[in-house]
Amino acid sequence: MRTICIPADFLIAVANLQIPADAEEQMQRLMDRNNDGQLNSDERKLLKSLVEMSEVLGLLRAKAQSLL
């Protein structure tokens, strides 16, 4: 296995990443509408993309935090 050096300030920056507030708000609105069964197909696709982005970001943050 190869070892790489990652600067601590980079890991801290990754660990502190957040979804932009407007994307978070949009995702919440879409989730609320989804719960009410009011999404069209384009909105469902957008919601899926936002949720996937949130999940990937969460995994990146968790990995960075584990390396600190």
Image (tube, helix red, strand yellow):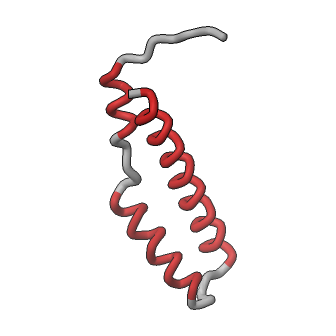
Looking at the image, residue 32 sits to the left or right of residue 20; the answer is: right
Residue 17: which quarter of the image? top left
Q: Position of residue 28 (x, y in %)?
A: 45, 73
Side of 59 relative to 15 (left or right): right
Q: Quadrant of the C terminus?
A: top left
Front residue of this view, candidates 1 and 57: 1
Q: Residue at the spot x=62%, y=64% of the render?
A: 48
Q: Residue at x 36, y 54 (%)?
A: 20
The quarter holding residue 64 reads: top left
Q: Is residue 36 depicted above or below 45 in this figure?
A: below
Please give the count of numbered marks on the rendered protein.
Answer: 0
Q: As rendered, which of 40 and 55 lies closer to the eye?
A: 55
Rendered position, 1 above or below 27: above
Residue 1 at what x, y percent from top left? 66, 11
The residue positioned 58% from the left and 67% from the top of the image is: 47
Tell me which residue sits at (39%, 35%) in the image. Answer: 14
